[in-house]
Image: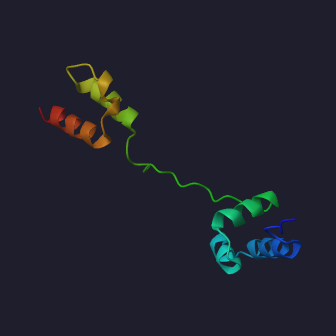
């Protein structure tokens, strides 16, 4: 029979450490297991709380859709094909059109 990855004692230890504020990375390092393994075990034990994801977008920057909508209002041509363009390219085009 294969030995379990986590004994009852080890499980109790990592749960206690995690609940005491020790990071998953530090726990994994201390017991010579991967962060993914420790996180999965903590999830199975019902104690892991995922960190809130950071918004990847800067709140003061317009979205690509907002830029396209603005471009649509000032461009003397159809803007349907610009969704594949980068935000930087769309911004440059808007600046160029507004300068005229």
**Where is residue 47 drawn, in percent x and y?**
79, 62
User: Can I make out residue 48 in this image?
Assistant: no
Q: Residue at x 31, y 40 (%)?
A: 86
Q: How is the image coloured?
A: rainbow
Q: Residue at x 28, y 23 (%)?
A: 79
Q: Examine the image and state in which quarter residue 23 appears.
A: bottom right
Q: Nearer the viewer, residue 51 or 3?
A: 3
Q: Residue furthest front?
A: 1
For the N terminus, give its image quadrant: bottom right
- Between residues 80 and 39, which one lies in front from this camera angle? 39
In which quadrant will I find the C terminus? Answer: top left
The part of the image, by quadrant, that contains residue 10 is bottom right
| Residue farthest to the left, as pictured | 100
Q: How many marks?
A: 0
The residue located at (23%, 35%) in the rendering is 94
Residue 76 in picture, x, y percent from top left: 19, 20
Q: Is 5 on the left or on the right of 88, as rendered?
A: right
Judge whether 66 appears above or below 38 on screen. Answer: above
**Is residue 56 shown left or right of residue 76?**
right
Q: Is residue 19 left or right of residue 84?
A: right
- Side (left or right) of 9 relative to 99: right
Of residues 28 and 93, which is closer to you in this image?
28
Residue at (21% x, 35% y) in the render: 93
Q: Is residue 78 visible?
A: yes
In the displayed structure, 93 sits above or below 39; it is above
* Quarter of image, res 82: top left
């Amino acid at each position: 029979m294969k030995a379990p990855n986590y004994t009852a004692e080890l499980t109790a230890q990592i749960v206690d450490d995690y609940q005491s504020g020790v990071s998953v990375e530090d726990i994994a390092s201390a017991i010579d297991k991967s962060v993914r393994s420790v996180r999965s075990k903590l999830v199975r034990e019902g104690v892991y709380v995922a960190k809130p994801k950071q918004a990847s977008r800067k709140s003061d920057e317009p979205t690509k859709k907002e830029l396209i909508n603005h471009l649509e209002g000032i461009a003397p041509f159809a803007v349907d094909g610009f969704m594949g363009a980068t935000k930087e390219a769309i911004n440059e085009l808007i600046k160029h059109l507004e300068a005229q």
